[in-house]
C-alpha cells in the first residue's frame, strides 16, 4: 500500500472560501493544539482543548472581522485518538469558519479524514481563496517525528505550480529548513531541499507557513531572494525560541494573521494572548 502522503488529489476540491471583495482576504493560522481523547486531559501541564478554545476566542477578539479561513497547521491530536478529533470537529464547526487542517507528526491522518473530512480541507489538497491558491501539504510519516512529503506529493506540487501561476500560499507542518534549534532541526522536513527546489521553479509561491516548533520564527528558503517562511506559535505551550518575539511575549501561546491582497501582495501579524488559567491540578492526576 502506498503511504498516505503519496495519495494526492487529482483535481481541486469543492471546498472554497468566501468570494473576495476589494479588501484583502484574511487567513488566521493556529498551530499545534495537541488535543487528547479526554477533553479535561492534560499535556505538558495544560489542558489542550481548553487552551485551543481559549486561543481561538482570543485570536478572534483581536480581529476586526472573522477571517476568510482558519488554518491549523498540524499536531492536532497528541494521542492520535478518535475522541480528540471529535472534540476538534465540534469546536471548529461551531465557529462557523471555513477550515483547513494539516496533519503533523502527532496525528493520525486516517482518523482525521474520517472525523473531519466533510468539514475541512485536509492536506494534501489545493483550494482557492479568491485570486489566491493555497497548497496544503502533508508531511506526516508514520513512526517519524520528522516530516516527509514523498515523491508523489512533490510531483503533484510541481504540476500545480506549473499549471497555474496564481499567487500561492504553501502550508506544511514541518519547517522545510533548519531553524537553528538542534532538537527541531533533527526532526524537520527531510525532503525540505527538494521542496525548496520545486518552489523555485516558478515565481508563484509567495510564502510558506508551518508549525511544529511552537514559536514565532521567520526565515528564507532556497537561493536568493528566498521564499519567506513563517513558523507559528502553538496554542498549547511555547518552546524556547530561537528568535526574539516581536511582541516580547515568546512564552505565551499565539497565532498569526495573514492578509492576502488581490494583486499578490501579502502582510502578516503575529498574535499573542495569555494562556487560559488552568484550575488547580487534581492530586489524582497522572
Ligand atoms: Fe510537530
Image (cartoon, rainbow, N blue to C red):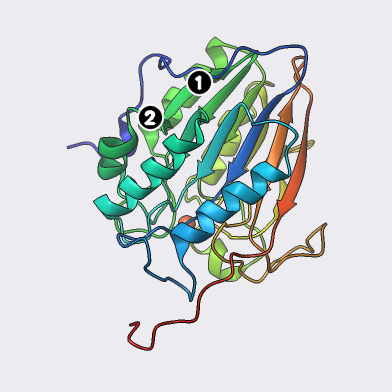
Secondary structure of residue under mark 2 = loop
Q: Pointer 1: what residue?
A: 127
Residue 208 in the image: state x and y as whole percent: 63, 37
Viewer-closest of 267 and 255? 255
> What residue lies at 36% left-to-right and 22% top-to-bottom?
9
Q: Is residue 164 above or below residue 106?
A: above
> What residue lies at 46% left-to-right and 62% top-to-bottom?
48
Q: Is residue 285 above or below residue 236?
A: below
Q: Which residue reaches farthest left?
A: 1
Which numbered mark, 2 or 1, is in the foreground of this view?
A: 2
Residue 277 in the image: state x and y as whole percent: 59, 70
Residue 221 visible in the snapshot: no
Q: Report the quarter where the C terminus lies.
A: bottom left
Viewer-closest of 263 and 119? 119
Q: Is residue 230 above or below residue 45?
A: above
> Is 119 on the left-hand or right-hand side of 228?
left
Q: Which residue reaches farthest bottom?
A: 283
Q: Pointer 2: what residue?
A: 119
Amino acid at each position: 500500500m502506498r503511504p498516505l502522503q503519496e495519495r494526492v488529489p487529482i483535481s481541486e476540491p469543492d471546498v472554497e472560501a468566501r468570494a473576495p471583495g476589494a479588501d484583502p482576504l484574511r487567513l488566521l493560522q493556529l498551530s499545534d493544539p495537541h488535543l487528547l481523547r479526554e477533553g479535561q486531559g492534560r499535556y505538558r501541564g495544560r489542558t489542550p482543548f481548553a487552551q485551543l478554545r481559549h486561543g481561538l476566542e482570543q485570536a478572534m477578539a483581536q480581529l476586526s472581522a472573522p477571517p476568510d479561513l482558519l488554518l491549523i497547521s498540524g499536531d492536532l491530536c497528541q494521542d492520535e485518538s478518535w475522541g480528540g478529533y471529535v472534540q476538534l470537529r465540534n469546536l471548529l464547526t461551531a465557529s462557523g469558519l471555513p477550515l483547513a487542517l494539516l496533519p503533523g507528526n502527532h496525528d493520525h491522518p486516517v482518523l482525521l479524514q474520517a472525523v473531519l473530512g466533510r468539514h475541512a480541507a485536509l492536506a494534501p489538497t489545493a483550494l482557492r481563496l479568491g485570486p489566491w491558491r493555497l497548497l496544503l501539504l502533508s508531511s506526516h510519516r508514520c513512526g517519524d517525528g520528522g516530516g516527509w512529503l514523498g515523491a508523489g506529493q512533490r510531483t503533484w506540487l510541481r504540476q500545480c505550480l506549473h499549471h497555474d501561476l496564481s499567487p500561492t500560499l504553501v502550508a506544511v507542518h514541518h519547517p522545510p529548513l533548519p531553524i537553528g534549534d538542534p532538537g527541531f532541526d533533527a526532526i524537520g522536513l527531510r525532503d525540505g531541499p527538494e521542496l525548496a527546489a520545486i518552489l523555485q521553479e516558478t515565481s508563484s509561491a509567495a510564502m510558506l507557513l508551518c508549525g511544529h516548533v511552537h514559536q514565532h520564527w521567520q526565515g528564507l528558503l532556497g537561493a536568493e531572494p528566498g521564499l519567506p517562511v513563517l513558523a507559528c506559535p502553538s496554542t498549547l505551550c511555547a518552546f524556547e525560541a530561537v528568535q526574539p518575539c516581536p511582541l516580547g511575549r515568546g512564552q505565551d501561546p499565539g497565532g498569526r494573521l495573514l492578509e492576502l491582497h488581490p494583486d499578490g501582495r501579502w502582510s502578516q501579524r503575529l498574535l499573542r494572548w495569555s494562556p487560559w488559567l488552568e484550575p488547580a491540578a487534581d492530586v489524582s492526576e497522572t
